[in-house]
Image: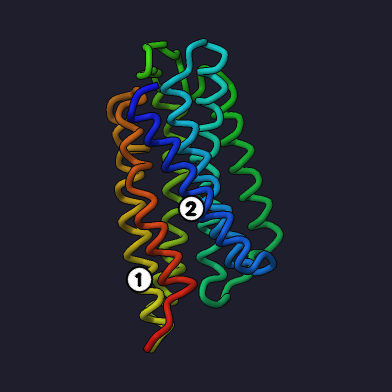
Amino acid sequence: MSLINIGLIFVAGLDLGMAFLMWLRNPKNKINISFAVAIFFLATWTLGVAMFGEAATMKSAWFWVWIQNFAGGLMVIPFFIFSIYFPYQNFVLKNWHKFLIFLSIGALAINVFVPGIWIKVIYLQPHNNDYLINRWGYGYFVLYFYFYLALAFIYLSKKFLQSSGFIREQLKYILVGCIIISLFSSLFGVIIPLILAHWGPVWLGPYFSPFFVTVLIYFGFYYNRK
């Protein structure tokens, strides 16, 4: 196993541990649940990236590319929900909103699991597997991913502008941390593959996550104003 993929498995373990601790802190709180689920999908995506890179058979390569891409797509949904509840709720999802969310996830599942829509072909190369992307199918994922990401930042930004004092300070750290991790992760995990039309250096994205996830957890859930 390559050192890059060993490191990714370690990063996935760190993220998974933080997700579990976040959930344990308040397992019935919607803020904790949504944030923990977002980190869980981040960890699953990271593990999928590592295991796809190490897959030795076409069957295992397809399995891990499905895990990687579906988890990567699902990641933005709990983050979007987190933005609705953190640090307070001023917007309620209606039934038709929920229906559209489930519809978009269903479309994502078709995009991920049906060969040829997103992934054209997989190339097995020891410790460095690759795949060719269908830009038309991948385009749906890009629109889906940035749509929910943009909505989340809009909700958090509105709360930041409308708040004051400690809540405003807390939101500032959350926004800055989320913007940084989103920029780096999506650059290597979304934009570069779209440009190159193949997997590319996706593995670089997950390496930015543990530090910023730790910062987000601290300022979002443990930081107290002196």
**Which is more toward the observer, 21 or 61?**
21
Query: What kind of residue is marked 2?
Result: Tyr
The 10 Å Cα crowd at callout 1, few under 14, some 14 to 19, many 20 or more, is: some
Say which of marks 1 and 2 sits in front: 1
**Which is more toward the observer, 28 or 131?**
28
Q: Which residue is pictured at 30% across the width and 42% down the height? A: 187
Q: Pinpoint residue 140: horizontal percent, then vertical percent.
A: 47, 36
Mark seen at residue 62: none
Left or right, residue 168 beside residue 38: left
Measured Cα–Cα span from mark 1 to mark 2: 20 Å
Above or below, 193 against 37 in this view is: above
Residue assigned mark 1? 173
The 10 Å Cα crowd at callout 2, few under 14, some 14 to 19, many 20 or more, is: many
Left or right, residue 212 beside residue 91: left
Q: Which residue is pictured at 30% across the width and 30% down the height? A: 201
Q: Which residue is pictured at 37% across the width and 89% down the height? A: 226
| Helix, strand or loop under label 1 | helix
Left or right, residue 93 beside residue 214: right
On-image quarter of the N terminus: top left
Residue assigned mark 2? 148
Query: What kind of residue is marked 1?
Result: Tyr
**Splitting the image into 4 quarters, where does residue 196 fall?**
top left
